Structures are given as structure tokens and as C-alpha cells.
Image (cartoon, helix red, strand yellow):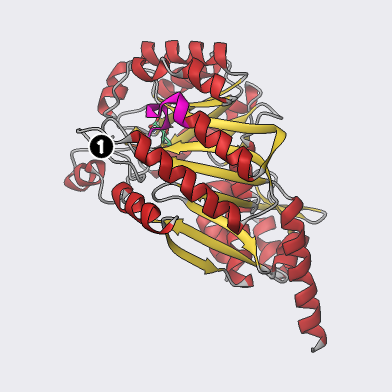
Amino acid sequence: MSNSLAVADDLTRRTAAAAVDEPFGVYVHWPFCRAKCPYCDFNSHVRHGGIDEGRFLAAYLTELGHFASLAPGRSVSSIFFGGGTPSLMRPSSVAAILAAIAKHWRIAPNAEITLEANPTSVEVENFAGYRSAGVNRLSLGVQALDDQSLKALGRRHSANEALAALALAKRHFARVSFDLIYSREGQTERAWQDELKLALSHEADHLSLYQLTIEDGTPFAARHAAGSLKVPGSELASALYQLTQELCERAGLPAYEISNHARPGSESRHNLLYWRGHDYAGIGAGAHGRITAHRAKRALSTIKSPEGWLAEVEAHGHGLISDEALSTEEAAEEYLLMGLRLAEGIDLDRLAAIGGGALDERRLSALESDGLLTRKGSRLAATPDGRLVLNRLILELAA
Ligand SMILES: C[S@@+](CC[C@H](N)C(=O)[O-])C[C@H]1O[C@@H](n2cnc3c(N)ncnc32)[C@H](O)[C@@H]1O
Ligand code: SF4
């Protein structure tokens, strides 16, 4: 074996060995919603005739068994029920999935177990049941704090219902986060300032604040193309973003990721695991996973159609539609892409260990002089200005 090959082999071995001790997450995707919001392109589906939840649950338990065989011996540090709308699940289904995860892997004693919930009254009734099932963190999809905006977003709850759901969530869960969408049609800096201040006064330990994205194929995209939906231009959108950073920082919830703000120590450990490039199993229709096995990081994804996924799991024990080993270059690029979203940035030594080699020194220095990147020891991070133009930054670094 040539010397450089031996070094590369040693690095891969070390990376693979490290994965076993690193955080490991389980993502559970529930692909159903009561109604489809006009801006959303997540893998979420409406089934007016209802679904056979018992049959779906059995399939989740089967698929979990398959993923456990792909990632044996791991200790689960976080579990995330996302969607879709997982708060449409019966608490007993959530409990059964958690019990199956505990059967296949070891769940770390302080594991973070999050469930995404919509704040309509029916779903709020399940909060106590989710807590009893073992969920210890709730993420509420509030989206806006005024009724007119909620209506424009096609949401089925009022601002008062959202606030009541938040109060109830805080009674049941030690950790609560909520989502807002800003940069909405007609939103001024003043209006967002008032709304965000109101949001911050409700003392969640974590906020996800997303700029409205016009996603292809959604009703919002069609209205945007036709000119009947007008969203803030890039100048106002940047001003709203800066305002978000300032207000959250002042309230003690700095951004730890482009759209995520937390009191120090209350960051979403599950989402950190994605951005830090750790492994996770993703089960349910249209879920993604990353599992290090046979010295390579594998990218896995399942069939998007809920019924297609169900049939596949029932026939073959899993709904995987793709399972590819990432090349070292692809794995390194993914680490760069995800890691630079974080305020803490990436570890250049880890980038090199994954196989990324050294970044171009001249380019790095130029981006530092432009105030878009900072370096401290082996850490490289985008500045707040850099995070605003992250795509450009990553293209330049990866070139
Ligand atoms: C997968 S959704 C699920 C949460 C839950 N079903 C709900 O709607 O409250 C996660 C979050 O993504 C955000 N989101 C979805 N589509 C978006 C878009 N087009 N632009 C910005 N944020 C979006 C929303 O804030 C939403 O809460
Ligand atoms: S935003 Fe949430 S509730 Fe609305 S369609 Fe998407 S996943 Fe479903």
C-alpha cells in the first residue's frame, strides 16, 4: 500500500471508529397533515378518508428493526418526531415507537426526545399523553402571531389558540420551541419587530425563525409567479434578518444556526447532529438518514409516498429507495455545507479527516478580509454577514 493510501485508510478507519461514540439520532417522519399549507413542500399528505394508524405503526416498528441492523450498538442521543404533523399520532403510537427504539438500541439517559406539534385544539389534547410516552421537548408550529397572517398562510389556528397551546406545552414539557415564518407578504420592519418582541416575551428556550421561501410547485409559487403574492424584496428581507439577529441576541437567544435561536445550552441537540455531520436513522415515508458503515458514510432515503412506503415495508421489511456510500469528497462537502450554517462553524481537522483536504488558503484569507469568515485555531465559521450569503460562500470555498 502506498504511503498516502495508508494515511487515507487510517483516517477513514478513525472516522468510522469515532462514529460509534458520537451522537446518534433517530428521526421519525409522520407524513400526514389535516390540510396542506399553501407554502409548504415538505413530504406531507392529506387523507380525508383517514388512515389505518395501527397498520402504519406496525410498519414503523418493522422498519426500525431494519435500521437497527444497519447501525448496531449505537447509543441514541436524540429522537425527533417530525412531519407532516406528528401531533396527529396517537400518544400510544409514539410510546410504542419509543419502546421499539429502546429495544433495538440503548437510549442515552439524558436523550432529547422532540415532537413537532400544530397548535390546534384537537392536537393540544394529546400533549399530556406525549409527555407520558417519553417526549421531553415540544416544537410548536405557531408561524405567526396575528390572525390575518395566519389566515394568509392557510393555517387552521388563531393567534390566541397558538398562545394557549404554548402555555400548555410549557406546563407539560421542560423544553419548548416554536416556529415563526417571517418576510411574509406586506410585513414591515416595524410589524416584525412587534411580533418578534411578543414572541420573545413568551420565554421559550428555543425559537426557529424562518424567512418565507417560495417553494416550486406550491400554490404560493403559482401566485408569486402570477404576481398576486408579493413578498419582501432582498433589501427588506435582509433588514428583517438583521433585526431578527439583534432582537434575539438582546433577549439572550442568539442564533446558533441561520434560522435557529436558543438560550445557550437549549440548542436542539437533534438538529445539531445534522449540522455537525453525525449519524442518524430516518424512518417513515420520505425520511433521510446518514449511517457510517463499512468505513463509509451512507446516505439513505425512503419512498416518499406513504402508501408506497407502507406496501414496501410490509413486503420487504423496509421502505428504502436509495442507499449510497458517499465518496470522501461528497462527505466532506456535506460537512462544509451543513457546518457553516452553525455559528460555531466547522472543525478544519475534522474536514481533513473526512477527506476534504485543506481549503484554498488564498480564498480563505480573501473571505476573511471581506468579513464573511472567521478562523480561530482549527475552527472556521461564517460571520453573521457570511451566513446571509452562505450559498455564495460555500460555492467559493468548495470550488
Ligand atoms: C415540516 S414543518 C412541520 C411542522 C408542522 N407541521 C407545522 O406546520 O407547524 C416545519 C417548519 O418548517 C417551516 N416551513 C415550512 N415551509 C416553509 C416555507 N416555505 N418557508 C419558510 N418556512 C417554512 C414552518 O415554520 C414549519 O413549522
Ligand atoms: S407546514 Fe406543517 S401543517 Fe402545513 S402542510 Fe407543511 S407540514 Fe403540514
Which residue is at 65% across, 52% downward? 278
In the image shown, does 70 or 192 lie closer to the viewer?
A: 70
How many residues crowd around disc 1 within 10 Å: few (fewer than 14), some, or many (20 or more)? some
Which residue is at 20% across, 33% downward? 48
* Image quadrant containing the C terminus: bottom right
Query: Up-down: is 265 above or below 234?
Result: above
> Magenta stretch: dominant SS?
helix
Disc 1 CB within 8 Å of nearest ligand 2 atom: no
Q: Is residue 30 left or right of residue 223?
A: right
Query: Up-down: is 57 above or below 308?
Result: above
Q: Is residue 279 left or right of residue 357?
A: left
Q: Is residue 156 left or right of residue 28?
A: left
On the question of residue 208 being in view, the answer is no
Residue 49 in the image, given as x and y percentages of width and height: 20, 33
On the question of residue 43 being in view, the answer is yes
Query: Up-down: is 139 above or below 362?
Result: above
Residue 315 in the image, given as x and y percentages of width and height: 37, 57
**Is residue 89 covered in magenta?**
yes
* Image quadrant containing the N terminus: bottom right
Looking at the rendered structure, the kind of residue marked 1 is Val
Q: Secondary structure at mark 1?
A: loop
User: Where ligand 1 lies, by image quadrant?
Assistant: top left
Residue 277 in the image, given as x and y percentages of width and height: 64, 54
- Of all residues, the one furthest to the bottom in this rendering is 2
Region in magenta = 85-93
Q: Which residue is mark 1?
A: 46
Which residue is at 30% across, 29% downward? 186
